[in-house]
Image (cartoon, helix red, strand yellow):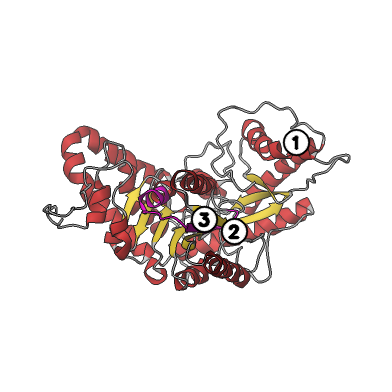
Amino acid sequence: MSTKQPQASFGTALRHAHFAFSPSYLPLNHGSFGSHPKAVTEVNNAIRAQVEAAPDSFIVFDFARGAAKSRELTAKMLHCSPTDIVLVQNATVGMDTVFKNIEWEKGDVILCYEIIYGAVASELSWLKIERGVDVEMVECEWPIGDEEMVRRYVDAIRKINNEGEGKRRVRMAVCDTVVSMPGVRIPFEKLVPALKAEGVMVMLDAAHGVGHVNVDLGKLQPDFAVTNLHKWLFVPRPCAAFYVRKDQQEKIKTSLPTSVGYKPRPVAGEEPFPHSESSEFVELFDWAGTVDNTNFLCVEAALKFREEICGGEDTINSYCTTIAREAGDKVAAMFDTEIMDHPDSNMRDCYFSNVRLPLEIGNGEGQVKPENAGTVADWIKSASAKECNTYFQTMLYRGSWWWRISGQIYLELDDIVKGAEMLLGLCERIKKGEHVGAKLSPYHYRPEAGAE
């Protein structure tokens, strides 16, 4: 991997010069919602001004051309055809579109693991209740070795199929590139081919994908994939790429909501609709009603910033991976705890580190009582936002609390150490029971809940 020298030094100076964060805010949680540079904001604002200057002509003619260019640029990064991807608001929209379009049959099983994203878990619950699809969990406990994880997935498929005696079969398997919480890289380059070899459809959740890890869809050829452009690629929120392999596109009969591009499947005795000159899959998602999707047209600006200011993808990757690792090691030493890792895994080959908090569940002095354990993570998030002017993404996983550290080009080690000192202070207050009975906002949003 070759790296180029960035025009601007990474770290605090770049944050103040190129990002719009308040000088008093410490952005330690890039992984949840992302952020984008001021230069990209300026492009986005200019596009919106063009829309308002001539709404009809821009929306009817110019938007489609701009979106096509963004799809081409995104497809190049994902190593796939532009006719195999469309732009949607976020990864959840893409996955839900697949789940609700597939014609599920009695005995169909979807396979996943326990740390899938909360919204995906909810979508699968809906399928189980409303469509009668069985959802089975692979027995994996993190940290786990890469080869062991692949083996358990394959073994689970074979066990279900063999025991089902033709009445139950694994129809689809869901896996990530990088899991949201805890933030760990999945061996998706090995797992996707192994799943395909078992004859199941593969849904690749690459929400933490493009701009974070290299995702080669042309090589992997999953059946379906989603990846957010607003998390790590610096495209304004919301924007994601939704991939459907060409031979599976006939399964996607409608966008959500159903768009003007919808063409009913012909029935016997009826003339089919004229064949579209463009991809029917792309056309289906081109126009799903009036919404402000001008952020879809900012992919080029985001890539320009990454190349010209940051020195390109390899330079960004090297810095973000390194600072996440160094910060994880440093914070684990400060907390006198541990990093989530495994000697036979590449789970840390990403922009996250997960450090165990110095808290224990129990009834002794300084311990968190079991009945109060469920409120700790939410209390930390609320207290950090209100009192520390930052945000700590923490979770309770199998009896321990973990802090997910996000590496990013606008951070340096001292920023994360400063955050760790504040988090240590919050942990001391938890040991004294300050979180018990605390009033949390009824509007508190928990996008990554579901693994606790």
Closest to the observer: 140 or 441? 140
How far is the residue under mark 1 from the one under mark 3? 44 Å
Residue 110 is one of the magenta-drawn residues: yes
Q: Earlier in the sequence, mark 3 or mark 2?
A: 3
Q: Is residue 232 above or below residue 80?
A: above
Please state if 421 lies on the left or on the right of 19 as rendered: right
The residue mark sitting in front, 1 or 2, is 1
Which residue is at 28% across, 51% downward?
253
The residue wearing badge 3 is 9
Position of 426 relative to 212 (above/below): above
The disc labelled 2 sits on which kind of residue?
A: Val
| Residue 76 image-quadrant placement | bottom left
Whether tag 1 and tag 2 are in contact, CB under 8 A, the answer is no
Discs 1, 3 touching: Cβ within 8 Å: no
Find residue 235 and report its horizontal and vertical position in percent.
Answer: 40, 48
Along the horizontal axis of the image, is 264 left or right of 248? Answer: left
Q: Is the residue marked by circle 2 packed among few (<14), some (14-19), or many (20+) residues within 10 Å? A: many
Q: Which mark is residue 372?
A: 1
Disc 3 and disc 2 in contact, CB within 8 angstroms? no
Which region shows up in magenta? 95-115
Q: Check disc 3 and give the amino acid type.
A: Ser
Q: What is the number of the mark on residue 300?
A: none
| 107 and 51: which is toward the camera | 107
Residue 1 visible in the picture: no
x 18%, y 57%: residue: 278
Mark 1 against mark 3, which lies toward the viewer? 1
Q: Residues within 10 Å of mark 1 (few under 14, many from 20)?
A: few
The front one of 390 and 345 is 345
